[in-house]
Image (tube, helix red, strand yellow):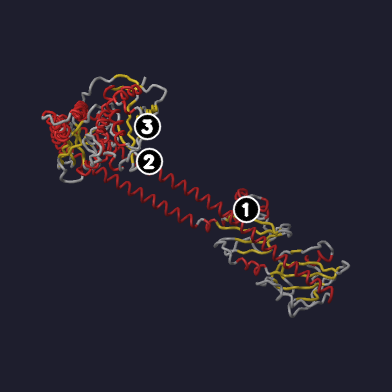
Amino acid sequence: MKEKLAIGHVKQALQVRYPMLLLLAGIWIAIVSFLLWDHRQEIDSGQRQSATLSESLAAHAEQVLLDAERLSHVIEREVRIHGINTSLQHFLPGNGLSEQPILQLALVDLNGILQSSSLKEFEPIDLSDREHIQVHLKGQVKGLFISTPVIGRASGRLSVQLSRRLTGHAGELLGVLVISIDPVQLTERYRKLDIGTRGLIALIGTNDRIIRMVRSREHIPGLDVGSEQPHLLPLLHKSAPEIQSAPASPELAQKALLLSAAQVANFPLAVVVGLSTHDLLAAYSLRQTVLLSAAALLTLITLMAEIGRWRMLKRARASDQQLSQALDQVSSRERRMANLFRAIPDPAIAFSQQGNHIEGCNPPMAKLLGWNEKETESAMLHSFAERVFQTDISQNKTARINDFYCSLEKALTTDHPPGVTRFEIQLDTPAPITYEVRLESLQDDPVGLLVLLRDITAQNRLERMTNDFAATAAHELRTPLASILGFSELLAADLVPESTRGHVAEQIRQRAATMTELVNDLLTLTRLDTGRGSGQHKDIDLRSIIDPLLKHLPEASSRLSIELPSETIRVSGNMPELVTALRNGVENALKYDTTGQRIILSMVSDAENGQAHILIRDHGPGIRSEDTERVFRRFVRLNTTGSIEGSGLGLPLVRSVMQHHKGWAWVESAPGQGLTLHMTLPLQTA
């Protein structure tokens, strides 16, 4: 025993250790995989954010340029009316911009001389050498020209010059409009955009690759306004994966930026946005730290638990010897109890209070229930109750099972069971079997209930037969005997006139016939109760019992409406008993149906359910639904007025015959709606 326990501890240790190691490995693999996936998701999300931001800023830059172009059209109309010296000071406050990126508005004549400015104090300046002036005077550009950042000669500040030629109604050149835009002021509009501590926003020309304006919290060498940056322009024609692998300047590579670019529609400009991976991965870094710390802590706790488990295993091995001795004592005690349990001659079974499981079942009980060892181990209280009634063929079988189960469950949950009780089981036998149930509480471990079954059928039958016979003799034979005795005394005293002697003799014969019929019914019931019956069962056609019935009751021919199927109804039965049952059913209908209507007697073969069905329906007063079972009790008569004669044995005899033939009998009725008697028998299969 000790060797088995030691081997069991080792196996248990191995079974716990390897799954734990596999679990830890799985956790680490899952965390690393998740972090790699999360990193990829953050980078992809940042790239999409950068692309979205560049497109939004390109749309905004386009709107600013379109506003400037619309402003130029307004000034062109003024120049056509008032000439090249038109005042420009009133255009800036009313241009509709909430912030003012425009440093100056200027008008230059055909010689390149500054003739008008939005500045309050200015002097005519020769601007003919400026690129943004020459392209218009020479007719090289017709639309809006965007220059590289230059130092304004009038404003003295670094600015991007937006220039446009002004023409008259006939298309002649009137001069050049110059709109000076402060690149720093323009980028201030993007201050609210979250580009991180290391982000970048730049506006670059697509033709000359020169940066017009740039915004970055940290200065990036080489990315200054007016500088040429050829590494940014190729981003316009690349997808997100290509952008990440595209070569960049050393300065941009050092900043680890996610770059994207968007073309400003209708203008030779592009917006470049760079988001720092350091800012984008800040939340990811926090998650990485938390997950790795949690995994490390879980690993440490698991290792400490393993160490503690091995220590417990060591202590458990030290107690193997004591446990082995205790198990030997328990096993010896259990063997003695099992031997005593098997020695009980009556069926016995023990249930545990916890879970309603079977703790023991002796051979007589296993034989009664038809259980093998495996079924006994898995059975429970409710399955035991169902198994006890497995061969019960009564109509209220389900109610009986529930009552029996409830009584067992109640006894199992109380400290003092009811002791002895009785119940009947209508088995697949000619007569019912009665068991006496003894319930004993088990207080030892496990706490439960001991159920003992004792077959008291013979004793019960003897008591019932004695009581029934005494009751019959006292109750039913008294009236006909008194009539016979009274008529006999009148005849003996010669007190009966000659004309009525025949009638008196007929009354004596009828009373004697009633007594004979009553005695025969009692003898039939007695034989059925003892399981003997009146003979062997044979294979018969159920329709053949109609002729003997009509011979015995010739007066019924005019009252019966007989409905029989054309096919044979094969059953196994005893012809005299079946005729007796049918006769009692028909006599009961004839006695109570005084309407004169025909009584229906029909037979049906129900092959689907394997039954032959006999039905007798009358048009009498009917009975209440709660009395449909009382009519099958012996000597019970619902009509207590005495107007209808009877012994109260007719319907009980019908049910006893049906039970003897493995069938059943019941009635359906309601007050004022007549009564229908049903009788069923199992069909005889081929």
- Residue 69 percent coordinates (x, y): 75, 66
Dot 3 corresponds to which residue?
Answer: 600
Query: Which quarter of the image is occupied by the C terminus?
Result: top left
The residues bearing labels 2 and 1 have C-alpha atoms spaced at a distance of: 45 Å
User: In the visual, does 233 lie left or right of 620?
Assistant: right
Residue 22, labelled with which disc? 2
Report helix, strand or loop for mark 3: strand
- Residue 24 percent coordinates (x, y): 38, 44
What amino acid is at disc 2?
Answer: Leu
Label 2: how many Cα within 10 Å (few below 14, some 14–19, many 20+): few
Say whether residue 454 is visible.
Answer: no
Of marks 2 and 1, the one in the foreground:
2
Q: 390 or 539: which is nearer to us?
A: 539
Image quarter of residue 646? top left
- Residue 664 percent coordinates (x, y): 30, 31
Dot 1 corresponds to which residue?
Answer: 248
